[in-house]
Amino acid sequence: MDFFPEFHTSEPFTIGVEVEFQLLDPHTLDLTSKAPEILAMTDRYHGDKIKKEFIQSMVEVTTGICRDSRGVCMDMEASVRLLEQTALKAGCLIHAASLHPFAMACKQTVSDEERYRDILEELQIVGRRLITQGLHVHVGMTDGETAIRVFDRMRSLLPHFLALTASSPFYQSEDTGLCSYRSKLFEALPRSGMPEALGSWSDYCSFVDLLTSAGVIKTTRDIWWDVRPHPELGTVEIRICDVPSKFRYITAMAALIQAAAMFLNERADDIAIENRAIINSNKWQATRYGLEGSFVDPFTHTKIPAPDAIRELVERLQAYLDVFNASDQADTIEEMLERGCSANRQRRIYLQTGSFKEIIRKERDKFWT
């Protein structure tokens, strides 16, 4: 084996969160390419937390390594509020959703970075359409074998996370009929979507070596699965989530994913590695219907409404939420279930008002509530 990625050990089950925010013109509420101005104002003091992304009408906010969702809340709130203030100085607003409802992909400017230019040259129209935003959660792992053990089993829970966060029903002024069109845009990329189970760290290394030796990828960052091992950071990275509509929901998702990772590791011997066809069936339900879909429950293999499957998951994770002082986040997840996903709320607002701008106004108004 010529390429054997080193797994950089992390403190077990610590978390880091990345959220991509849209940048909006305050008058038209269209996407605006203000990232360079914002980054110029934040790079000196906050460059490690507010970062460049693929297009100039979005920026990414990241936390440091946090022990629990309370740490995520404190870290990210400080950065997001700074971003809000800086955006206003740059003449724009920020917005949390995974697709802007009426912005045109052809009008977006790719960020000035060689990696992004290379990606766009390779992906062509697939890349030009990729004007999406997402929520990524990293969970620290002690070693590669632990990472693969959690990775293999985490796959079956990804549809649960997508259904809770789905926030991308519209694209270029069209109702896609889906709750997460972002997830379908991403599936058009090579090396994306729902991965197969890997089995072991050595199997993962053999896979990466094959792709690297064949010139398919340059680094493991060129693998864009819904969940992936991240050897350089020593984490498993959950990438399937749309951006939640409320700040509280971001921290609740971080808590849920952190608890799930510990649960899957400790109970690995009791948890079957799910067939990818079943997982993809559930993912489609989340993509199409959000919280109004039905899942084949990964623990009982019976088909039940998605909210019931998520409630059963939260119940299984309650002791692990307690470990991370996040038992109150179960109440927030229940609130998310009762309110329904952002995508269906956006659709209702549009049916009532006929205005994409009104969707943005109403969702933005509730971000900090």
Image (spheres, rainbow, N blue to C red):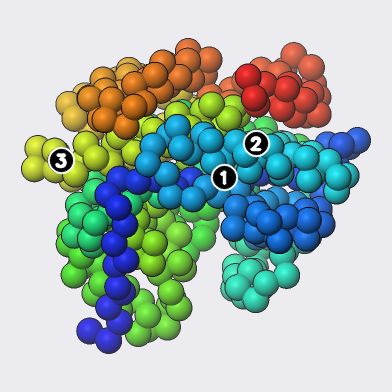
Q: Position of residue 243 (x, y in %)?
A: 56, 38
Residues 88 and 246: in front is: 88
SS of the residue under disc 3: helix
Q: Is 202 on the left or on the right of 221, as rendered?
A: left
Q: Earlier in the sequence, mark 1 or mark 3?
A: 1
Gap between marks 1 and 2 measured at Cα: 9 Å
Determine whether 88 is above or below 225 in the image. above
Residue at 23%, 60% (x, y): give it.
Answer: 143
SS of the residue under disc 2: loop
Q: Disc 3 designates what residue?
A: 266
Q: Position of residue 133 (x, y in %)?
A: 61, 46
Determine whether 310 is above or below 195 in the image. above
Image quarter of the C terminus? top right
Q: Disc 2 designates what residue?
A: 96
Gap between marks 3 and 2 measured at Cα: 34 Å
Determine whether 102 is above or below 230 in the image. above
Residue lying farthest to the left in this orientation: 269
Gap between marks 1 and 3 measured at Cα: 28 Å
Q: Earlier in the sequence, mark 1 or mark 2?
A: 1
Q: Disc 1 designates what residue?
A: 19
Residue at 23%, 45% (x, y): give it.
Answer: 153
Residue at 91%, 35% (x, y): give it.
Answer: 27
